[in-house]
Amino acid sequence: MSPRPLVALAASAEPVDDVSHIAVREVYVRALERISGCAVAVVGGPAPYLADLLGRFDGVVFGGHRIDVQPARYGGPPRLAPADPARDELALGVLPAALRAGLPVLGICRGLQELNVALGGTLRDLPGGSHREDLSQPRDRQYLPAHEVRLSEGGVLRRLLGAPAVRVNSLHHQAIDRLAPDLRVEAVSADGVIEAVSTDAGCLAVQWHPEWYAGRDPVSTALFREFGRQAFSRSMASIGMNSWASGPMAQA
């Protein structure tokens, strides 16, 4: 049996009992293990050494976070708000390195925003509450599909999902402002918010949260299965290269 691909899942700082913990939500791990078929290593920061360890992984995932990217990271105005500088440093250091290494990358919510900032883009606050979660509803209802996004013709998502538009959930108050030069728009909401992006290097990021209903919602399931397929291909290629490098031909 082939080994499971090993993917790095970025953690965030979370206060528990007045002590900061490095944590991830279990739903990410569950989706990556059950739907993508991957083994998961949780990584936290600041970790400048992690970029040097990317060769040990078959993919990288940056999920959501309750704390925004610090505006100073993209030239935005300062604000009085909670910050997670370790997560910022992790994202801005690891994401460009992962793309240079050709690793599959999946970005979710803040992960999409981090990708845009890491590659030279900016973010903006969204007015009103049209894209925000309804905190009066139970958590399971907050993550149900809430609006439609149009998929770019000829894009990765359009080919993967086989439809011109899909319905997704919406739990964010920021969005891409200036798109980074190396990113391609994959989906847009009716009010013009960029909802998904990709790169030519096997990276896909979405503004919504597919992890919550992965395995039950077809759109969410397809995203995690595709990431797993890419991670598996990367793993097999690495095993092949390592076997060749240590085989008889390498010793001749």
Image (cartoon, rainbow, N blue to C red):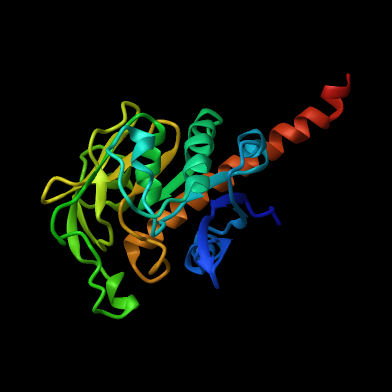
- Furthest residue in direction front, as rendered: 80
Nearer to the camera, 222 or 92: 92
Residue at image position (50%, 49%) is: 61
Residue 230 image offset from top left, x and y in percent: 51, 45
Counting labels gives 0
Can residue 104 be seen here? The reply is no
Q: Quadrant of residue 59?
A: top right
- Quarter of the image with the C terminus in it: top right
Can residue 59 be seen here? The reply is yes
Seen in the picture, residue 168 relative to 101 is either above or below; the reply is: below
Residue 119 image offset from top left, x and y in percent: 39, 31
Seen in the picture, residue 36 relative to 198 is either above or below; the reply is: below
Residue at image position (13%, 45%) is: 192
Nearer to the camera, 163 or 178: 178
Residue 46 image offset from top left, x and y in percent: 58, 44
- Furthest residue in direction left, as rendered: 191
Left of 53 or right of it: where is 8?
Answer: left
Left of 168 or right of it: where is 66?
Answer: right
Nearer to the camera, 65 or 167: 65
Residue 120 image offset from top left, x and y in percent: 35, 29
Seen in the picture, residue 182 relative to 165 is either above or below; the reply is: above
Left of 204 or right of it: where is 143?
Answer: left
